[in-house]
Amino acid sequence: MRWAPAGFVLLVAASFNPFASAQTPEVTKLAASLGSANAEERRAAADGLAVLGPLAAPAVPQLLAALESPDAELRWRAARALGRIGGTEGIAALRKHAADADAHVRAQAVYALGRTGDKSKESLAAIIARLTDTDAQVRRTAISTLRGLQADRNVTIPLIVKILEDSDPAVVMPALHALAEEGAAVVPAMIDALEHKEARYWACLILAEIGADGKAAVPGLIKTLADERPEVRLQAAVALGAIGPEAKAAVPALVKLMSD
């Protein structure tokens, strides 16, 4: 049996692909509709391009223009479409709109950045900045996006610590709550954070909220009881107390701490 040339196989496969011949005109039409005078038509066009995903790549320039629209509904739909399409062309714009005035746009821009798979420091910083967002959904989206990207913790932890330290305490607490809500899923990151002097305090606060599910962090917390800063030692003790019986290995260190 003779094998057909690869080019021929691809041509035959394309002939059986219902999208291969039909999508280009459809994408062109939807891209043009993004400039319609009718708001509903513009939004529907963005939704249609989102459904097509990577096949809608030729419409990226029009989606980038839509992302600058004064219509917030169109902006978030355009951001969603860019995320579904993927690729690198929209990354810079998505970073910008991760700080959009509209919370829905911010959430979709962060989600879309995650869909691109970009793990550059600039994109990670744009996502991490939303951990202290005033909107709970945006905070949750930032956390889930970071988890999905599985970026190097040596990059993400310093960025997280910096954004927490630079933020107003009233804004920081909801971010800590949002991180703690992830429970056991964030414990490995918190264990790593305990190894970073500037991150220990925040890691202790988060582990205290996680409670018993943070039992894997007990060795790191015991080590943290020897930190030279009293506020860090205190929060490590609080976290161990919140973990409960699973932290019994810390008793000798805690007794010693009380006698100091």
Image: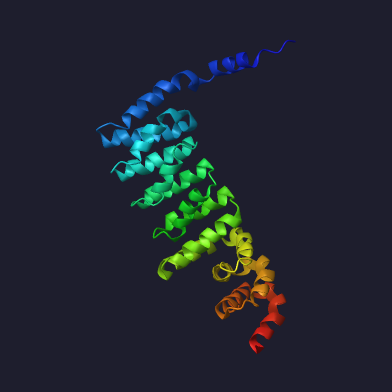
Q: Is residue 218 left or right of residue 84?
A: right
Q: Is residue 181 visible?
A: no
Return the residue nearer the eye: 212 or 164: 164
Q: Residue at x 30, y 41 (%)?
A: 69
Where residue 238 sits, quadrant-wise, is bottom right
Q: Does 9 sit above or below residue 215?
A: above
Q: Position of residue 231 (x, y in %)?
A: 55, 78
Q: Residue at x 49, y 49 (%)?
A: 122
Q: Position of residue 168 (x, y in %)?
A: 41, 68
Where residue 46 sits, quadrant-wise, is top left
Q: Residue furthest left?
A: 37
Which quadrant holds the C terminus? bottom right
Q: How many marks?
A: 0
Return the residue nearer the eye: 90 or 180: 90
Q: Position of residue 56 (x, y in %)?
A: 44, 29
Which quadrant holds the N terminus? top right
Q: Is residue 169 visible?
A: yes
Q: Residue furthest right?
A: 1
Q: Residue at x 61, y 66 (%)?
A: 196
Q: Residue furthest bottom?
A: 259
Q: Residue furthest top?
A: 2
Where residue 192 sits, quadrant-wise, is bottom right
Q: Is residue 15 left or right of residue 139?
A: right
Q: Does 69 sit above or below residue 131?
A: above
Q: Does 11 sit above or below residue 58?
A: above
Q: Does 64 sit above or below residue 154?
A: above
Q: Position of residue 215 (x, y in %)?
A: 66, 68
The structure's colour scheme is rainbow
Q: Is residue 59 left or right of residue 230?
A: left
